[in-house]
Structures are given as C-alpha cells and as structure tokens.
Amino acid sequence: MLSWLTENWFNLFTVSFGSGLWFAAYSIHKDTQIRKEEVKARKVANLLAITANHREVWKIYLYRKNLERVRDSLVDPIKHPVTHAERVFVNLVVQHVNSVYYAMSDQFVVEYEGLRQDIAQFFSLPIPHEVWDRIKIYQNNEFVAFVESCRNWK
C-alpha cells in the first residue's frame, strides 16, 4: 500500500484537489442561485411596500374633499391660490415619488415602467406644478433632475 501511495500520490492529490474545487464551485453556484432568489423576493416585497404607501397617500386625496382641486386641470392657482392642505398633500406625493426614485436607482425594487409618464401627468396639473416649483429647491439635485426630465417627457 505504501508503494502504491508513493507512486500515485500526485494522481490522488489531483483527484482530491479537483473534487474539492468542483464542490466549492458547485456550492458557490448554489449560493448565487439562492441569493438571486432572495434578491427577487426582496424586490417584490419592496414593491408591495411601495404600493401600500402609494395607496395610503392617495387615500388622503380620496377622503378629503378639500383636495379635489389637486387633480383638476382647469384650476387657476393665480386666481385661487394653492391651499395649505393642497401643498401638504402634493409634498406627500413628492416624498413618495422620491422614495420610489431612490429605490429604483439602487435597484431595490422592480422598475415601474410607467413612472415617467405618471410623474409627467401629475406635475403637468396646475397645483402640483405650482407646489413643485416652490419645493424643488429643498430636494436633492439628482431627484430634481429626474422629475424635470419626466416633466419634459413625451
């Protein structure tokens, strides 16, 4: 037996080393697959959280009659200035969009393909437009650039 080991030590070492590498590679592959699934699950969970937050913000709009003008495209904010409640509501929407933007930028959520169009439509309305123009100076430059690019989106 000792002579066989002496003659075949290199082959034995090569087989065991190769097997070790193969098992390590297989283990890494499995871990990667598990991580990909965890990332997918996390993205879906984040999307569900964003959807819940979206619903909560818009519940305020639905249940408060003093916010009806926010989505009215015929409102003249010069003749009838934006109210405090309208300003607060639009600010809530901006903060929600800000959260969605950064979650998407960091790839923490599934990309919302209609986001640009949704933002463009909302900020084209007179009251959101007026409020945004006043509060954008308090936002991060990167986020402002994103919203402005959406507003100019066609």
Image (tube, rainbow, N blue to C red):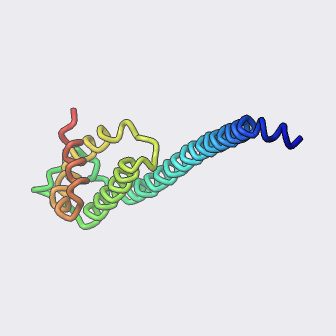
Residue 46, position as x, y percentages in the image: 50, 51
Residue in view at x 32 percent, y 55 percent? 98
Q: Which residue lies furthest to the bottom in this view?
A: 84
Query: Left or right: where does residue 22 sit relative to residue 100?
Result: right
Where residue 112 appears, as percent x and y from the top left, is 40, 40
- Of residue 59 and residue 40, the one placed in the foreground of this image is 40
Residue 103 picture location, percent across and down: 40, 52
For the point 39% across and 47% down, which residue is it?
A: 104
Q: Which residue is drawn at 15% across and 56% down?
A: 133
Query: In which image quadrant can residue 113 be found?
Result: top left
Residue positioned most to the top: 154
Q: Nearer the viewer, residue 65 or 129?
A: 129
Q: Position of residue 94 (x, y in %)?
A: 30, 56
The N terminus lies in quadrant: top right
Occupied quadrant, residue 92:
bottom left
Residue most extreme to the front: 3
Residue placed furthest toward the right: 1
What number of labels is visible? 0
Comparing 126 with 117, the one in front is 117
Give the residue at x 69% y 43%: 20
For residue 48, side relative to residue 78 (left or right)? right
User: Closest to the observer: 99 or 122?
Assistant: 99
- With 121 as the anchor, is 2 left or right in this view? right
Quarter of the rendering occupied by the C terminus: top left
